[in-house]
Image (cartoon, rainbow, N blue to C red):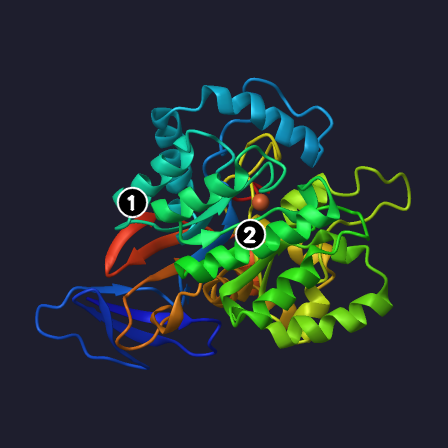
Amino acid sequence: MLFQNARIENAGTCSDIRVLDGRFQAIAPHLDPLPGEETEDLGGKLVLPPFIESHVHLDTCLTAGDPVWNMSGTLFEGIECWAKRKDKLSAQDIRDRVNRAVRMYAKNGVQHIRSHVDVTDPKLTAMETMLQLREELRDVMDIQIVAFPQEGILSYPNGKQLLEDAVRMGADCVGAIPHFEFTREYSVESLNFAMDLAVKYDRLVDVHCDEIDDEASRGLETVAARALELGLRDRVTASHTTAMGSYNNAYVLRLMRLLKMSGINFVSNPLVNTHLQGRADTYPKRRGVTRVKELTAEGINVSFGHDDIFDPWYPMGNGSLRDVVFLGLHVTQMMGYEDIVNAYRFITHNAARTLHLGDGYGIGEGKSADFIVLDAENYYDALVQDAPVLASWKAGRKLAQSAPASGEALF
Ligand code: FE2
């Protein structure tokens, strides 16, 4: 099949793309159709590699208000609400909700998801079901699973064993939540345990790290130091790191050297963290988002994630990463032209590094024909106009489509 007049990644000129046997066979300014070849004129629309959700909790999605609403809007009340909802958790319940959420993502051009899955459950119901769904949905969504100890590794009964069981069952990544552990000592020990587990089972690491406004929450330095010392480096991701927004600058100056040496990735979740953080503040009120602008300027990899979709921690969300980027640019004050037009990288190339997708990701000859078409000529316009994803193609197969935006003033 031949796609004509594609504007690949904000390019000033258009290209034609030939897809054969599910792969990009040729990409050039002009390609003549082969005899009998199907063609589609993209009319100069923006073509990007597929969007990547680098941080979400699929096991909790679409549960807001069931059985109780999070009235304060805090992270910790969210954890209490979820502890009540966990009693009702069943395989069918998870299947129904995850299937709905995956379709929401697919419609919005997402083809890869890293989902954290709560393993502080003696039955590991969610983990078992999510591992099945990872395989069942493989043709339409690439799902990576993090064994996530929501209520702690050392601070939850049998937490170490549950985490290791989940990893042995087949989780792709080891998680941790150092700021939720009872003590500073537990926090450090939990990280040592998680990182050693990743080495033992050859897994990636993604830590819910310092998701709190406490400037004394310093799990990040331990994560980075262990990533460096164990040689895990860019196999490790620090998610949230909102406390970094409260650290003093002298400490960050020293910390930044270690972060660069370690090679770890960061995930920021602007929608959820602007909602959850700053809750103990009156005024001035902190923004609750990590130092995305400064980390990016230092060459450190940062991606953006949704974190939650309509669950005890976040009462909104629709699977569109456009909203994540839109708010992320505002709250981090990354609003220069180049910042905006290139912001798709937070949910494409940068996220691909976080997920360790390797050289197979992206638009290039010989790679799997995975791409999306947006109803705009460049990402700046797509972001401002909330342009729909007209089509999402995976290995040469159309997975989702939307109609162009319509509506007009009648005067
Ligand atoms: Fe999270």
Amino acid type at circle 2 is Gly
Report if residue 116 is visible in the image. Answer: no
Tell me the element at label 1: loop
Q: Is mark 1 within 8 Å of ligand 1?
A: no
Q: In the figure, 292 relative to 61: above or below?
A: below
Tell me the element at label 2.
Answer: loop
Which numbered tag is attached to residue 274?
none
Q: Which residue is mark 1?
A: 137
Mark 1 surroundings: few (<14), some (14-19) or many (≥20) residues within 10 A? few
Task: Give me the residue at 51% from left, 68% from top.
Answer: 232
Quadrant of the frame with the N terminus: bottom left
Write the residue at 64% across / 43% down. 272
**In what quadrant does ligand 1 lie?**
top right
Give the amino acid type for the residue marked by disc 1 in the picture.
Answer: Leu
Question: Which residue carries the number 2 mark?
Answer: 305
Horizontal and vertical percent position of residue 105: 42, 45
- The answer to whether mark 2 is within 8 Å of ligand 1 is yes
The percent position of residue 69, horizontal first and vertical second, equals 63, 22
Q: Can you name the residue that lies furthest to the right here?
A: 283
* Left/right of residue 278 with respect to residue 266 in the rendered view: right
- Residue 256 pos. (x, y %): 73, 72
User: Of 293 and 242, which appears nearest the observer?
Assistant: 242
Name the N-terminal-most of marks 1 and 2: 1
> Which residue occupies the foreground of this view, 231 or 327?
231
Q: Which one is in front, 264 or 312?
A: 264
The answer to whether residue 99 is above or below residue 305 is above
Cα–Cα gap, marks 1 and 2: 20 Å
Residue drawn 71% across the image and 39% down it: 182
